[in-house]
Amino acid sequence: MIEKTNINAMSDDAIVATMAAFIKHHRLEQNKTQSQVAEQAGINRLTLIEFEKGKRSSIITFIQLLRALNLLHVMEQFKITPQVSPIQLAEMEQAKRKRATRTKKTSKKTKSNW
């Protein structure tokens, strides 16, 4: 069973190690070699080796590796969805039109003699 840890209590190095372990785990689960994943990600194999050791990391490399392993869905957690507060929702309901208004007949206006 995988143990859950509080991510807020982890150091930056521990988080990088977790990301590295995630990539390595899924690479092995998909039975792909480091060379295959590195080529698909468009990075050097040595970059992948260092990433998996938690020594060298960049967000771009991480995204490239996620893409190569078909794991980009992990990034869904970062998507921002706008939220409407109950007060804003009530205000929007109040602003909605309740009925149509008659169109006014336009009368001929006389021109000024100025």
Image (cartoon, rainbow, N blue to C red):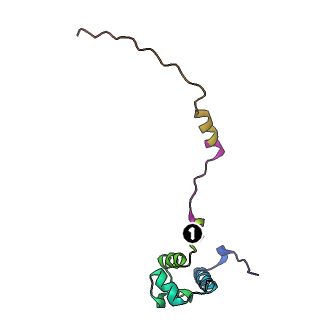
Check disc 1 and report the residue beneath it.
75
Q: Identify which residue is drawn at 36% across, 11% down.
A: 108
Q: How many marks?
A: 1
Which of the image's four quarters has the C terminus? top left
Say above or below: 74 vs 82: below
- Residue 86 within the magenta-colored segment of the rendering: yes
Quarter of the view holding residue 16: bottom right
- Tell whether 10 sits left or right of 56: right
Depth check, front residue: 53 or 12 = 53
Quarter of the view holding residue 80: bottom right
Residue 22, position as x, y percentages in the image: 62, 81
Residue 82, position as x, y percentages in the image: 57, 53
Say above or below: 16 vs 100: below
Quarter of the view holding residue 6: bottom right
- Tell whether 77 sits left or right of 111: right
Q: Residue furthest left?
A: 114
Which of the image's four quarters has the N terminus? bottom right
Dot 1: element: helix
Q: Identify which residue is drawn at 58% across, 30% down.
A: 97
Depth check, front residue: 77 or 55 = 77
Say above or below: 9 vs 25: above
Residue 96, position as x, y percentages in the image: 58, 33
- Tell whether 89 sits left or right of 55: right
Depth check, front residue: 91 or 29 = 29
Residue 95, position as x, y percentages in the image: 58, 33
For the record, the magenta segment spans 77-88
- Residue 54 within the magenta-colored segment of the rendering: no
Q: Identify which residue is drawn at 60% across, 51% down.
A: 83
Which amino acid type corresponds to the residue marked 1 in the rendered image?
Answer: Met
Q: Residues within 10 Å of mark 1 (few under 14, many from 20)?
A: few
